[in-house]
Image (cartoon, helix red, strand yellow):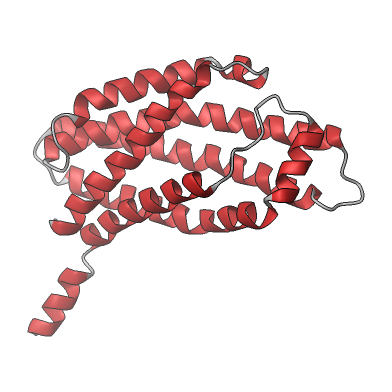
Amino acid sequence: MATATATQTAFAPGRLAGLGGVAFAVIVGAENIALPRPPDFDASGEEVLRWIHDHHALVATMVASFAITAVCLATFIGGFLVRAFREEHEDARVFAVIGAFGAILIGAWFALVIISQLLLLGLDGSANATPATAELVWHLHTAAFTVNVVAIGIAVFGVAGAAVRMGLAPTWCRPLSFVALAAAVATTMQSSSAMNGGSGWQIGLISFVSWLLLLAIVGVRMARTPA
């Protein structure tokens, strides 16, 4: 009986959800560090084809890892929502739903990023590949990437708001979430400018880093104190 109880505790859904959040943050963070500088958003088709050819194996590995990170994110959000709805504070539940909505948007928009990368991988070495086609696919990649930033901001705002109220994140995560949301909105509003070589979109890095940091913090606390 004691062994069974210990096993159930070790694999408690809350603990698995927390580990999912940590795994997502670690994998995505490592990928972005390892990935060589991609072409500019307004790069020519020739530049895009050259880049995907030079880094084919690494991009293919990142595309494959989406199957893992998607599961990690879904596991985290599912466990986080369940925990939030066990709380007495209605505000925590509201913010958790907002965060879950943002995470769903992240999954959907990032799937388009992955699809565009798959198309580029398919074009690499294809006898029918043309610079015009590669440029079109890269525009799809850029559009999905920049629109996805606002989804990240929404997720940070919601998860942080709920996590602070649930004792799963330090209080400084709350003001950070406002900054991350504002930066995300500013980035996505500049999507058309970014498509044409504008440089203001980099402010969205604040939102991205905040998201990974928040997932790591909340994930560790959920894993340590499964509800």
- Left or right position of 24 against 174: right
Q: Residue at x 62, y 28 (%)?
A: 143
Q: Is residue 194 above or below residue 119?
A: above
Q: Residue at x 12, y 42 (%)?
A: 87
Expressed as whole percent of the image width and height from the top left, the position of residue 123 reads: 80, 48
Q: Is residue 158 above or below residue 29?
A: above
Expressed as whole percent of the image width and height from the top left, the position of residue 132 reads: 85, 32
Expressed as whole percent of the image width and height from the top left, the position of residue 197 reads: 65, 18
- Left or right position of 115 against 217: right
Expressed as whole percent of the image width and height from the top left, the position of residue 106 reads: 46, 38
Residue closest to the eye, 29 or 162: 29
Q: How many marks?
A: 0
Classify the position of the C terminus by image quarter.
Answer: bottom left
- Can residue 178 be seen here? The reply is yes
Q: Residue at x 66, y 58 (%)?
A: 57
Residue closest to the eye, 52 or 139: 52
- Can residue 81 be seen here? The reply is no
Q: Residue at x 21, y 23 (%)?
A: 175
- Left or right position of 53 against 99: right
